[in-house]
Image (cartoon, rainbow, N blue to C red):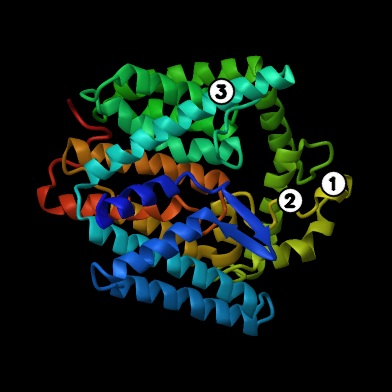
Amino acid sequence: MNIKRFILYSTIASVFSEAIYFTYIIDYKLFYLILFINFFLMFFIKEMLVSKNLLIFYSYLFLTGLFSVLTGTNTSSRVLSQVVGISLVSLYYYNFFGLISEKISHLFGIYTRFATIISALGLIISCIHSFMRMEFMPVKSIMLEPAHFVTAVLPALYFQIKDKNVAYYWNRVAILLAAILLSGSSVGLLGLLLILFLIPKKINPVRIILPLIFASVFAVALYFTFPKFTLRIDDTVNSFVNKDVSGANLSSYSLISNYLVAYKSFSRNPVLGGGLGSHVITHDREIGTIAGSEEFTEFLELNSQDANSLMVRVVSELGLVGILIIFSFIIKYYSAANESSLWISRAVLIYFFCKLLREGHYFSPEMYFFIFAYWLNYVQNRDKREDTTQLCPSS
């Protein structure tokens, strides 16, 4: 295997490596080891590059972080750790896509094959664990938790639905769909509803209304037949409306408590937020003021590092400007130039939806793979634009 091929496959495999790590003072992840080795290999193949836009972005994060330190809402160690992590991982993926120089559809096909293998492994692991414990164990494969698993593989299911010419097409779709359903993740179920909405080919009232009706019926059926889904919906809605986490399940407590902390941070710093990495500091200061938090003494700090949601964390740490950066990127680099590019754009949008809803880590292994795939899909197709009024590609 030549060096470029090793870098290609090891990088895409690392998308699913979040749970492979050990801790000694800090976390040592397999993902970081792969990046270190591949960075070293890249030096022998190509010049390491960084774009002007990335430098502007890094500078913005650093300067706003420095401002938050000076105003007392943050610490220098929090800012530096986040800026360094974001810079290294994003710089790696920028150079990775520049080195590989493959069509993004080909790279997404490789990612989809890996996702199918990871899903099949997850089904096997779940069966073994369920048999050993004599109770159902949700599918999470080799990932940290079911929500992170479905966030990483949902784009593969959407992309695979389009790619009907591959061998064992229905087997692949069935494996991915079964693994996502059996994860029991609320994020996974919402992601599947989004897939149903995105499958229609054009903006057409009938083709939009029918999936919405089906999705609504599906959601109602889940609510009345899936107790964990029902519990999370009820607890989350009640806690959100009353701004009181009393009696909530642990998942709802984590989501709503972090939302309320972020709201307090946003109220004080609506434009720039509390600064990169500051949410955990705000959480420590404010969690005791949230009604019902006294019931979760052992879990007060649950998900305080990442706010349990990227959107919540961005609101807390980067304010309105951070929100504008995210959605400006999504809108600007959306591509509907042809059938393949539109399906890739939509597949990554599903990832963005799940990531913003549930995952708050700024440099998880898969995040910049999808960000730069989304950007590269636009770049490779910007001179081939056709009618962009389509919601999904026509066949």
The residue positioned 88% from the left and 45% from the top of the image is 295
Q: Quadrant of residue 89?
A: bottom left
Apparent side of residue 48 relative to residue 30 in the rendered image (left or right): left
For residue 158, the mark is: none
Query: Would you say residue 136 is visible in this rendering?
Result: no
Above/below status of 328 relative to 294 = below
Q: Give the distance between the C-alpha atoms of the residues marked 2 and 3, in whole angstroms.
A: 25 Å
Q: Give the distance between the C-alpha atoms of the residues marked 1 and 3, in whole angstroms.
A: 28 Å
The residue positioned 73% from the left and 61% from the top of the image is 283
Of callouts 1 and 3, which one flags the residue occurring earlier in the amino acid sequence?
3
Query: Would you say residue 125 is visible in this rendering?
Result: yes
Say which residue label 1 marks.
296
| Label 1 secondary element | helix
Say which residue label 2 marks.
302
Of callouts 2 and 3, which one flags the residue occurring earlier in the amino acid sequence?
3
Mark closer to the observer (2, 3) = 3
Looking at numbered disc 3 in the image, what kind of residue is underneath it?
Leu
Does the residue at mark 1 contact the one at mark 2 (Cβ under 8 Å)?
yes
Say which residue label 3 marks.
182
Q: Quadrant of the C terminus?
A: top left
Above/below status of 240 relative to 92 = above
The residue positioned 24% from the left and 25% from the top of the image is 166
